Image (cartoon, rainbow, N blue to C red):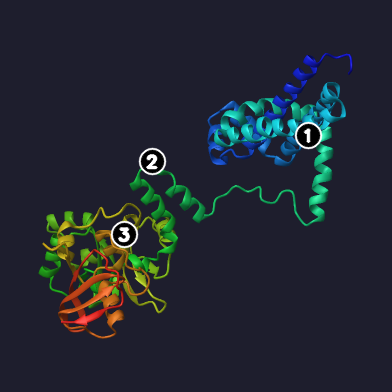
Amino acid sequence: MDNIPLSVLFGILIFLIILSAFFSSSETGLMTLNRYRLRHMARSGHAGALRAQKLLERPDRLIGLILLGNNFVNILASALTTVIAFRMGGETGIAIGAGLLTLVVLIFAEVTPKTLAALHPERIAFPAAFVYGPLLWLLYPLVWGINLIANALLKLIGVQPGEGSATALSQEELRTVVMEAGAMIPKRHQGMLLNILDLEKVTVEDIMVPRTEIHGIDLEDDWSTIVRQITGSSYTRIPVYRDSIDNVLGFIHLRRVLPLLLNNKLDCEALKGLVREALYIPENTPLNRQLLNFQRARRRVGLVVDEYGDIKGLATLEDILEEVVGEFTTDPAALIKDYTPQKDGSYLVNGSVSVRELNRTLNMTLPANGPRTLNGRVLEYLENIPEAGTSLLLNGYPVEIVQTHNNLVKTLRVYTKRRQKTQTTETT
């Protein structure tokens, strides 16, 4: 070693520091790769991504290989620095050399390359994967022995080496990914994806049409009334019953009924022959499951029943889809009837509208748990039947009772701007 010129020793030392920087940066780059982007690139045939994915299938071997190379290079650099420092300054130079090497390794072989790799992992990891593949094959016996000892030590402290390797996202993690996608996913599409994730939290009871608002054909009515209902209906599928909706026979599709009506072949018996048996839906069925049930049964509408089998309402495929994409099948006339804008910025709202629909239509944030309709929410809050002119705050939103009928709140004036105080009720 004494016969080797200092210039050669310095050259070898610089090369070792570069190798150390390579091992440090590639370790950070490979470990911080976005696993989902890596899978996408690998499926697209990216050579570097394919090699990196294969290496990351066994991270224990990859880490063992990187640390083996990094520690070997650093120890060799330390020994070489000792020789150079002793030749240049004797025993005093050894201490100075150790301090300088520590500073150089920290800056040029650790902090700087690892920061670069953390900021641009793909630019570092993919080229490194081409080096680590052959290197792992060459040093496999040594890496295997190191991993064997390390895994045995992990098992002694109760840690299984295979734990934590799953990369599946939970629902909340996926929600965070969608919300942080920024400009990569349009705002409206973000909302649709989040609504899909929320489908299992919403039941058919939350989106159903209440039984009091179900429009159907009563076979006990006179024939002229039935014909007017058929020709004037805004729906394509209509329930058919006797006396009340509790005695429902099924549904008819107007596409099958109208040709008979136009050819004067439709009568009560022909109408009953077109009835298709109703699909019944338990009230607590989550929307994601009911969507699959509709698809499996090839149906678009069903009757919602409670635990006693009593009919509570009606749910359609369109209602579920609107929970994802927003309103798109709503009859404009019905919308105007339920929400009438006023000059002061408020809205006259039908008390029978659902809280979820109100939030979606007027961009409000009333709690969706509890009573399903605005009328029910007001009655729960006041605990009595209010008189016209009663004012209150629902979750910070000013609401005024405009009209009541019997035991129902028919019309309310709703202000969509919240106030700070949320527990005020007054009667004027």
Disc 1 marks which residue? 71
Question: N-terminal of the two: label 1 or label 3?
Answer: 1
**Residue at the location (58% across, 32% down)?**
116
Above or below residue 2? Residue 185 is below
Above or below residue 105? Residue 306 is below
Q: Nearer the viewer, residue 362 or 18?
A: 18
Instruction: Give coordinates of residue 221: x percent, y percent.
Output: 15, 74
Above or below residue 101? Residue 172 is below
Instruction: Give coordinates of residue 220: x percent, y percent.
Output: 18, 76
Residue 117, by quadrant, is: top right
Instruction: Give coordinates of residue 396: x percent, y percent.
Output: 29, 70
* Kind of residue at disc 3: Asp
Q: Are marks 1 and 3 in contact (CB under 8 Å)?
A: no
Q: Which mark is residue 319?
A: 3
Label 2 neighbour load within 10 Å: few <14, some 14-19, many 20+:
few
* Kind of residue at disc 2: Ala
Q: Marks 2 and 1, how far apart in space?
A: 43 Å
Instruction: Give coordinates of residue 186: x percent, y percent.
Output: 35, 43
Q: Nearer the viewer, residue 359 or 251?
A: 359
Q: Answer left or right for 39 relative to 191.
A: right
- Count the marks: how many? 3
Q: Are marks 2 and 1 in contact (CB under 8 Å)?
A: no
Res 267 seen here: no
* Kind of residue at disc 1: Asn
Q: Marks 3 and 2, how far apart in space?
A: 29 Å
Disc 2 marks which residue? 183
